[in-house]
Amino acid sequence: MENQLAAIAAVITTKPETIQGGGAPVFVVTDQKELQKTSMTLEKIMDASAHEIDMNTIIIVVR
């Protein structure tokens, strides 16, 4: 079995005040609809996985 490394490639949120600094770009959106649309688009572009952290934040993870 190979070792797989995962990295957060992007963070999408409706509440930027809850995000601390880090190494991934943060996309700030205005509502839940835009949150879902942006995360699905980035997921496809990056050939990655979207994971909901809470109702206001989704991360894009690449392996």
Image (cartoon, rainbow, N blue to C red):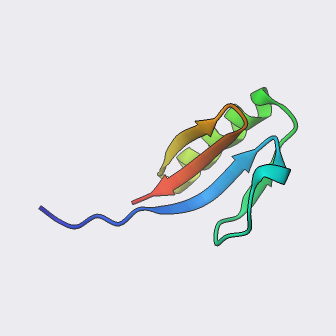
Which quadrant of the structure image shows residue 10? bottom right
Classify residue 2 as left or right of residue 34: left
Q: Image quadrant for the C terminus? A: bottom left
**Where 20 sits versus 39, above or below?**
below
**Where 18 sits versus 54, above or below?**
below
Point out residue 14 in the picture as x, y percentages from the top left corner: 81, 40
46 or 27, which lies in front?
Answer: 27
Point out residue 19 in the picture as x, y percentages from the top left corner: 75, 56
**Where 23 sits versus 36, above or below?**
below
The structure residue drawn at horizontal position 74% and vertical position 62%, both measured from the top left corner, is 20
The structure residue drawn at horizontal position 47% and vertical position 52%, both measured from the top left corner, is 47
Callout count: 0
16 or 32, which lies in front?
Answer: 16
The structure residue drawn at horizontal position 22% and vertical position 67%, both measured from the top left corner, is 3
Residue lying at the far left in this picture: please name it.
1
Q: Image quadrant for the N terminus? A: bottom left
Residue lying at the far top in this picture: please name it.
33
Classify residue 29 as left or right of residue 50: right
Classify residue 63 as left or right of residue 45: left
Classify residue 46 as left or right of residue 37: left
Point out residue 41 in the picture as x, y percentages from the top left corner: 64, 43
Point out residue 44 in the picture as x, y percentages from the top left corner: 54, 45
Residue lying at the far right in this picture: please name it.
30
The structure residue drawn at horizontal position 78% and vertical position 34%, both measured from the top left corner, is 34
49 or 18, which lies in front?
Answer: 18
**Where 8 sits versus 23, above or below?**
above
